[in-house]
Image (cartoon, rainbow, N blue to C red):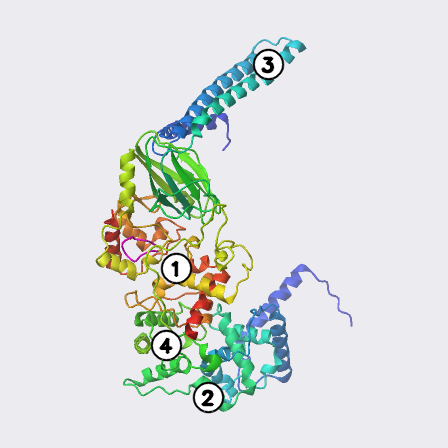
Amino acid sequence: MRINFVLTWKKMLATLLGAAVLVLLVGWSGLVSISAASGHFAPVRWFLGWTMENAVRRQSMPVDRPAGLDLSDPALVLRAAGHFATGCAPCHAAPGIAQSPVAQAMTPAPPRLEGRVEDWDDRALFWIVRHGIKYSGMPAWPAQNRDDEVWAQVAFLRALPDMSAETYAEMALGGLRPPQLPGDAIFSDALEDCARCHGTDGLGRGEGRAKEAFPVIAGQPETYLYEILLAFHEGRRESGFMEPPARRYAPETLRRLAAHYAQQPAPDIAPVPPRPEGPLPPRVGQDEAGTLDGLETAAGFEVPPAAPGGPPASREALLDLGRRIAMEGLHARKVPSCQSCHARDERRNPNYPYLPGQPGWYVEEQLLLWREGARGGTGWSHVMTEIAQNLTRQQIEAVSLWYDHLREQ
Amino acid sequence: MILSAKVILPRLRVFAALLVPAMAAACSGEFSTLDPAGLEADRVAVLFWVMLAGAFAIWIFVIVLCRSVVVRAPRENSERQARRLILWGGAVFPGVVVTALVVFGVGMMPELRRPADGPTIAVSGERFWWRIAYDVEGGPGVVRNLPAGGVPSANEIWLPVGRRTEILLSSPDVIHSFWIPAIAGKMDAIPGRVTRLVVEPTRTGVFAGACAEYCGDTHAQMRLRAVVVPEEDYAAHVAAQAEPAAVTEGPGPELFLRSGCGACHTVRGTPADGLVGPDLTHVGGRSTLAAAILPMSVETLADFIRSPQHLKPGVEMPGFGMLPEREIEIIAEWLGSLE
């Protein structure tokens, strides 16, 4: 038999239209299998998995791993532990916790992660945590501008295979049970939720090298704590760690949480000297030959701002520059002193958080977010935008180091 | 529509009728370089009028020449005549005119280059305002950074009449240009260099200035006011500026400090000692706000605190509209009272 067929433009168009109508008819028929109960047909299962693995490996190739990132840093691991318990464990289970049959009944069923993280390199894990996987139930990271949080989560995943049930319980579920406080169950639950990371004392959990895993919220102004929780609650400040718990509770509960942490004693650090009174001595003067002084010290940072790496500086020089930025500011670079708003001082506006006592990484991360325009916050957060943008990378490093060194004393 | 002469000419006439008064208006007023109030501006104006008259005479001559060539009965010119015309009209005449202008112009210079005999004022062009320090120690050593000290102020520069005042210019950020058209020519303010401009105002009055080098978003609103007064008034003004603020106690300064304003602004007599923005010790005494673009009043002060971005897009000060309305009013009232 011979089929004589002449392909014309008309016929091609009719075929395309016919195919489209057919697809719509199939969808309209209501006969497509969307039941999760039956799982996938084996070849389809293979095809979907193969496609997903290829996509993750290919698309994670350009992921930029930050310089100096140490995924075995206990502070990084601890920072993401609390979020794992509420964000990941409900589906993926955790050491010492069996997987829920509810999760197992998903198609595809989410795997336990202990045996699976080995299959992926760091970039791929980062990509999966940040982007999620379409059609699988794996969500994207709620805050797309917070790569720092995603890397912390990757660090936790790397630590997961060797984690004992006891370690997991201690890190993610909180060894410290909050004391029974007067109040309703919602508030107790909420406080327990906070305490899993921040501790009931607000100083942050973790010992030794993990001591600095969390920003200090103890003894901060109540107004600031409430406003910033509200900003997380309403999505005005991005964070994959903080937005979910802040969203879980109503503003009244957030207000009580703010009051609780504002009343906790502030961290025990050496007293910060008051800012010098009166006009400051000029720092960059010149001798009669017209040579600038201060060029040989870290003060030189303010002279060649365009230098890609800035002049090399010792820890002492960096600390001196950090102290200057914090106490005096760099007025030629339009950077006011940090301490003029952020000192622990009752006379200041309670919308300004206190910085002494905060770990350096936190100060640095927030300044970098501001510099990129990705740090939302309360109705006051825009005040910092211009300041952070006027700071060079080295100046941010220096001032963060100075705040960090206050904790060591 | 076809753009024929019939269509264009009446429109041109309307345009000219509108343009001429507009241009004539520029001949006087606080911004005019043709209504001079300073020695240098005066010489520039003389030079302008002389050159304008000369250019007009030459223009008439060229038009007459063109007409004679086109309209007069064609008659063969000898090659000799043509060469002579080229020599006299194309070489000798321009040579004489340019030489005369050079002699005339250079002759003006010694007078304009005389050294200063008045005070030295440091002016720093900053995005987007002018930092002023009266009576600084100048001298030849000041070449890369403005000298420290002096009596700080901002955006309103007082000058003694009849004295040659030296203005030292620099900038911490980008290149600006200091220009008070009625008093003197422009001078750039360059980061890492100190440039000098000597001005000699010849009559008292208030004159407008502006930044004349594009410096960013709100460059067009980086204005300045020059107040020219007799010498004793200048000294009295500088002495008054050196005093601490008139009111340093009460709810105004308390709220100012509490809100963190002191991180960027200095109000002498209070702990506010920030050096990022303008010195506000005598802000209420200045006649304008926001680098001479708004009249000074408690209302404009409050508006500026509330939302500087609306009044001056691109300004570096963050808005403080999140402060309670009553607090903004108290701070504005206090600042307005600082004369």
Whole-angstrom CA distance, mark 2 to mark 4, is: 28 Å
Please say if the residues under marks 4 and 1 sit with CB atoms less than 8 Å apart.
no
Label 1 – label 3 distance at C-alpha: 71 Å
Residue linked to disc 2: A169
Disc 1 residue type (three-letter): Glu
Q: Which residues are magenta?
A: B265-273
Q: Which subunit holds the residue at mark 2?
A: A
Q: Is residue A110 visible?
A: no
Q: Amino acid at mark 4?
A: Asp
Which chain does the residue under circle 1 lie in? Answer: A
Disc 4/disc 3 C-alpha distance (Å)? 93 Å
State whether discs 1 and 2 lie on one chain: yes
Q: Amino acid at mark 3?
A: Trp
| Other residues around mark 1 within 10 Å, as few (<14) / some (14–19) / many (≥20) | many
The residue indicated by pointer 4 is: A268
Residue sitting at x 42%, y 48%: B127
